[in-house]
Image: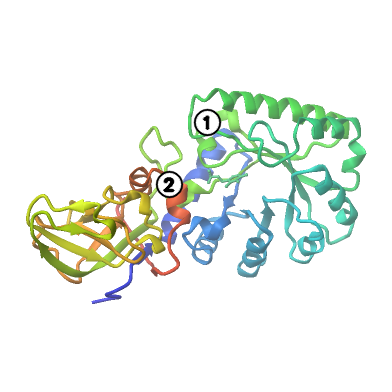
Amino acid sequence: MIAADTPILRIDPAAIAANWRRLDAENRGITPQAATGAAIKANAYGVGVEIAAPALAGAGCRHFFTATLDEAIALRALLPDIWIAVLNGLPRGAASEFLAHHLHPVLNTLPDLADWQRVATAPTAPAALLHLDTGMARLGLDADDIAQLIDNPARLGGIRLDYIMSHFAAAEIQDAPSNHAQSAHFAATYAQLTRAWGQRPKTSLANSAALFLGPLAASDLARPGYALYGGNPTPLSPNPMRPVLHLAAPVLQIREIPRSAAVGYNATWTAPRGTRVATIAIGYADGIFRAASNRLTARHGGSTIEQIGRVSMDLLTFDVTDHPEIERGSLLTLLDDVQTIETLAVQAGTSGYEVLTRLGPRYRRVVEPLYSGA
Ligand SMILES: *Cc1c(COP(=O)(O)O)cnc(C)c1O
């Protein structure tokens, strides 16, 4: 029996590679010469950057996006030859780090531009990306900044821009009016800015979901993340991606409790009948949301089993009265090709992105092919 007291996360790098190729085909169906990158921030959405990054590079991905400078430096150590951009921008005083590790900064503010200008003409300076806010109000130049830049394009003097980028606020909702508004806003701003500046950098727009919006989100470089790791980029339709993960935890103990006995902290579940309870080795410290207490399910041999009581730090309890085959050492499955990231997200009242990025540090991680034939 393997790892009898530890949750086991199985990860299929071939499925990550297949998902990248699928998204790349989608992207080139819209823009034949376009490139498809990969968002690999937050430890590749919890999946493990040291597993995901080589799989993506092996599939042909050349463009990687991290959130932070530290993530980018770690990724550079893993893959010396790839193109890496840092979405969170250029921290004050950090320009030399970008040169030393050959990282492409995303310039989000006018002070970012001024900082980068000081190093941009150095022979080792990488090209930058310019981020225009078209309706997220999060990062990127706002309308005032853009007006100042159009008035005075010398603020871009000496800077080499690889891409001008923007980000959609609701790409996963196919008919959201904001998608059209942001796309039109980007096209108009790009035209004004490049006319004033006299250069026409490439563009970068689509996240995972936007790749399924058709020509609306067409650009030279896509930046999918979630769908690479098996998340559904089209939540209102069946998932076109291959599942990447399998998460299971072993039963530590089985007990029988009488009718009216309570289970777990604060007695949030009381037995309506004599009940057989299985306790498994996974809890909120492993990314299983406490908010999903009494709503979670697990799978075993094709059946669905109900979780009962509060989610503890290291443990979950299940009603296995009708499953005598479940015993000490049995594995209950939390994630597979039927119970998906989205299933857990609904049970926890959150998004699949949060389910992924909470994947725990304590799992025994096994890299192997999954769901062959899928
Ligand atoms: C995280 C992120 C992405 C990737 O988005 P997904 O929805 O995970 O595909 C792309 N662009 C930006 C700016 C991001 O922050």
Residue 248 occupies quadrant: bottom left
Determine whether, in the image, residue 146 is placed left or right of residue 353. right
**Residue 302 drawn above or below residue 172:** below
Q: Quadrant of ligand 1?
A: top right
What amino acid is at disc 2? Gly
- Amino acid under label 1? Leu
- Name which residue lies at 52% across and 57% down: 44
The quarter of the picture where the N terminus appears is: bottom left
Q: Position of residue 144 (x, y in %)?
A: 80, 31
| Left-right relation of 17 to 79 | left
Q: Quadrant of residue 125?
A: bottom right
Mark 1 secondary-structure assignment = loop
User: Is 206 on the left-hand or right-hand side of 282?
Assistant: right
Q: Please, what secondary structure does the residue beneath circle 2 have?
A: helix
Identify residue for label 2. Answer: 352
Nearer to us in this view, 174 or 203? 174
Q: Which residue is mark 1?
A: 213
Please tell me whether mark 2 or mark 1 is closer to you in this view: 2
> Where is residue 160 drawn, in percent x and y?
83, 48
Q: Is residue 98 above or below residue 176?
A: below
Tell me which residue sits at (75%, 34%) in the image: 142
